[in-house]
């Protein structure tokens, strides 16, 4: 059940982040939700490994934070300038 909540939280945060970043980064619509879900699932795994059983506010908070980190990664990957290519 924890992983189901992790996927739902990651999908919602990723969809909102992808919608906000779509004008600036063309691949944000699919990459933001994907990385947010991955971050949320990692948070759930970490909470299960180091915490007690059951779903609590600490796990929820960690899922939200790591989902936002996933969206942040998309933002910083898209804001990098590409290396100039020579046409020699």
Image: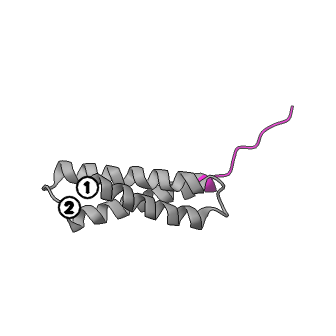
| x and y, in percent, of residue 3 in the image | 29, 52
Q: Residue shown at 66%/55% (left/top)?
A: 26
Q: Residue shown at 66%/62% (left/top)?
A: 24
Q: Residue shown at 31%/59% (left/top)?
A: 5
- In the picture of the structure, the residue carrying the numbered disc 2 is 55
Between 74 and 30, the one nearer to me in the picture = 30
Give the residue furthest to the left. 52
The quarter in which the N terminus is drawn is bottom left
Q: Which portion, as a residue range, is magenta?
A: 78-88
Left or right: residue 54 versus residue 45 is: left
Question: From the viewer's perspective, is residue 51 above or below residue 87?
Answer: below
- In the picture of the structure, the residue carrying the numbered disc 1 is 2
| x and y, in percent, of residue 63 in the image | 33, 60
Dominant SS in magenta: loop
Left or right: residue 29 versus residue 60 is: right
Q: Are marks 1 and 2 in contact (CB under 8 Å)?
A: yes
Does 81 lie within the magenta span?
Answer: yes
Q: Find the distance from the CA under tag 1 to the CA under tag 2.
A: 6 Å
Give the crowd class for mark 2: few <14, some 14-19, many >=20 residues within 10 Å. Answer: some
Q: Residue shown at 51%/66% (left/top)?
A: 16
| x and y, in percent, of residue 46 in the image | 25, 50
């Amino acid at each position: 059940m924890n992983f189901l909540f992790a996927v739902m939280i990651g999908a919602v945060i990723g969809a909102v982040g992808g919608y906000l970043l779509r004008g600036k980064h063309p691949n944000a619509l699919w990459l933001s939700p994907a990385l947010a879900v991955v971050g949320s699932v990692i948070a759930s795994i970490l909470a299960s490994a180091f915490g007690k059983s059951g779903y609590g506010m600490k796990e929820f908070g960690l899922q939200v934070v790591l989902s936002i980190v996933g969206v942040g990664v998309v933002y910083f990957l898209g804001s990098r300038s590409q290396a100039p290519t020579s046409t020699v």
